Amino acid sequence: MYDKGVSIKKLILLPVSFFGLLLLVFFLSGNPFNISTQAQSLPAQGELGTSEVSEQDAQKAQDYFYPREQKNMESLSRISVPTPPPGYKQPSIRKVHPILFVAQDKTVLPEHQPAINSTMQLIRRWYSGPLEQNNLGYTFEVANVAVYNAPFPFSHYQCGRAWCAPDEWIDLDLNVVHALQDAGYPVLLPGFIHEIFVIGGGGWASAWCYPDCPVWPDPGPSSETGVAVVGDWALDAISTGPNPDCVVQMGSACNKYPQQGAIAHELGHTFGLYHANDDPRSLMRNWWDFPYVTLIGEPKNDEIRVVRSNQFIGSRVCTHDSQVIRSNMPSTVTKSLPDAPNKFFISFTFNNYGWCRWTPTTFNTFLVKDNVWGKRRANVLSNVYPAQEYRFRFQLTAPTTVGRYYSLWKMRKSTTFFGAQVGKQIRVTNP
């Protein structure tokens, strides 16, 4: 459908060393995202979540992912950007467009589309966190996922030949992109970024952009179009659970959050980012620590400037929201006696689902109903950036009178409540 006349630039990927940089993590000071790779004792009030990937699995992810990402991108020299048709105008609102690519012999599961949509919504919130400035968040707009039912079996796209061995992978991204272009999708036209989820694509991960893809060691400048391709390892993790083949290679790096990080990492390449000069604080290096990673804003590694200046990124007011992730509260407790108060712990976890960070001086969780527990609020003890989780854990005291009482809690900025409510009615009984 399009004239494919402009060759695209490669991302030059170099091997990175993990153990030397891991040492750097433990000596970094002033880390705004409180990155931690080891379990810590739980404070009395609560704690920020941490990466769920062990050091051993992080090393596996490092060793497995980057060499294959580099190999996958070898087809870039043959991928071309379509010449825009006469009179072409870029869309007035630029969006990231996810596509679910379904070969003729593959099947869409009911979980796939909701999982892709919810993941892209979480990722756009995550990007807003490190880009926050002057009480504004900065992020991209995203369309709902489109499903493309391809006319040929998967082997046709896997290797681009009439026949290939089951374990032979050649130019999957090249073939998928060209199939979508031939079907009329505006892939790699100016004003469009696409993230393609390929059913059957295994551990495939690649991305590229045009015209200003980054060249090592620095990111940017920025892109006007791009495309990312991921396979089953990412799709399974966000929809039905860790992919078994992935677990063999990377263990806990195949869980939901880490694979959301892989999706966000490939999207970062389409915005013009490289691999963070091997800085383990960055999504573009330690994607498996998502969402407890950031973008770097240093003079020689200014990922924040590159993304914030990208034409796909726009500002928005710092509105706040929260989601309940989990909670642990008893349904029944015995009443307190005058000389023997009954104290017990509750815990619950919120996700920052807004556009800007929660700060310790301003944000807390507050009791909404039935002030009988001896505690009404618990403060956030560290910055909580969008897409990150914060677990509150604190002690309540049962009232001295039997009955049914509510323990309902919401997030609050200063005196303004926002987001989801967590809690239940607790029955207080005689000992």
Image (tube, rainbow, N blue to C red):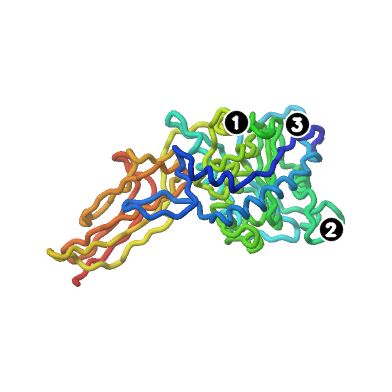
With respect to residue 296, does 170 lie above or below? below
Which residue position holds label 1?
310
Badge nearest the viewer, 2 or 3: 2
In the image: residue 153, left or right of residue 220: right
Q: Which residue ends up furthest to the right in the rendered image?
A: 162
Q: Earlier in the sequence, mark 1 or mark 3?
A: 3
Quarter of the picture holding the N terminus: top right
What amino acid is at disc 2? Cys
Classify 10 Å Cα crowding around label 1: few (below 14), some (14-19), many (20 and above). Answer: some
Secondary element at image label 1: loop
Q: State how far apart marks 1 and 3 are (Cα).
A: 20 Å
Q: Earlier in the sequence, mark 1 or mark 2?
A: 2
Q: Where's residue 301, x and y in %?
A: 58, 32
Question: Do the residues under discs 1 and 3 have CB atoms within 8 angstroms?
Answer: no
Quarter of the picture holding the C terminus: bottom left
What amino acid is at disc 3? Pro
Q: State how far apart marks 1 and 2 are (Cα).
A: 40 Å
Secondary element at image label 2: loop
Residue shown at 54% from the left, 52% from the top: 257
Classify 10 Å Cα crowding around label 2: few (below 14), some (14-19), many (20 and above). Answer: some
Q: Which mark is residue 164?
A: 2
Q: Which mark is residue 392?
A: none
Q: Which mark is residue 84?
A: 3
Q: Is residue 124 visible?
A: no
Secondary element at image label 3: loop
Residue shown at 63% from the left, 36% from the top: 273
In the image: residue 40, left or right of residue 371: right
Foreground pick, 280 / 22:
22
Q: Where's residue 235, x and y in %?
A: 62, 55
Q: Residue 163: which quarter of the image?
A: bottom right
